[in-house]
Image (cartoon, helix red, strand yellow):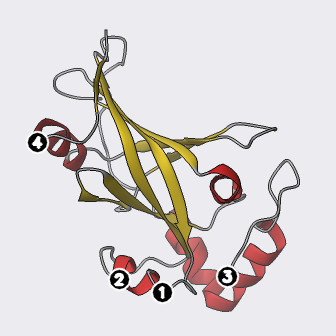
Amino acid sequence: MGKLLDALSEKELDFIVKQKLFFVATAPIDGKINLSPKGIDSFRVIAKNQVIWLNLTGSGNETQAHVDENGRMIIMMCAFEGAPNILRLYGKAEAILPSNSKWKEYISLFPKVPGSRQLLLLHIDAVQNSCGFGVPYFDYKGERDTLNLWAEKKGEVGVREYQELKNTTSLDGKPVRLD
């Protein structure tokens, strides 16, 4: 049986800093649910009820389309080594784009990464821990450099052109802001 909390405790904070992978799920009011794995050095705890992650340019932009529509988001992390655990963070998110005044404040928390397109700030309203007994062990071998190399090769202008072509409409035809 899972344990439900209203904020992150020291136990969850310790668990989060050890994670190399997290999953983000969002859903529009009507349409396709999105679930994406995330890695790289892109996750930070701001407070016991706030986390933020850096979203990089990808093949779509479902997360922001859904967040702009209703803000609902869940982030999940699970232990692939050590004691079994699954951690879920539920809440309302806001997309912070480079044109937003909050961008400079929060982007400084992350290393400079080519292809950065938005920050997603999650205001946590529930934290759930569950057993994770069914999660297998996996060995972390390192980060892939493919996305960074792709963005570096395209350059800022090329990444922006790609975003305008591939990241302005969700799978369900919902508009996505770039600025």
Which disc is residue 101 wearing?
A: 1
Q: In the structure shown, which secondary structural element does the residue marked by tag 4 occupy?
A: helix
Q: Name the image quarter holding the C terminus.
A: bottom right
Amino acid type of the residue tagged 4 in the rendering: Glu
- Residue drawn at the location 20% of the way across and 50% of the way down: 17
Q: In the structure shown, which secondary structural element does the residue marked by tag 2 occupy?
A: helix
Amino acid type of the residue tagged 2 in the rendering: Glu
Q: Earlier in the sequence, mark 1 or mark 4?
A: 4
Compute the Cα span from label 3 to label 1: 12 Å
The residue carrying mark 3 is 179
Amino acid type of the residue tagged 3 in the rendering: Asp
Compute the Cα span from label 2 to label 3: 17 Å
Residue 10 spot, x, y in % from top left: 11, 42
Residue 57 spot, x, y in % from top left: 61, 68
Residue 51 visible in image:
yes
Left/right of residue 129 with respect to residue 32 in the rendered view = left
Q: Earlier in the sequence, mark 4 or mark 2?
A: 4
User: Could you classify mark 1 by the number of other residues whose Cα lies within 10 Å: few (under 14), some (14-19), or many (20 or more)?
Assistant: few
Compute the Cα span from label 1 to label 2: 8 Å
User: Could you classify mark 3 by the number of other residues whose Cα lies within 10 Å: few (under 14), some (14-19), or many (20 or more)?
Assistant: few
The residue carrying mark 4 is 10
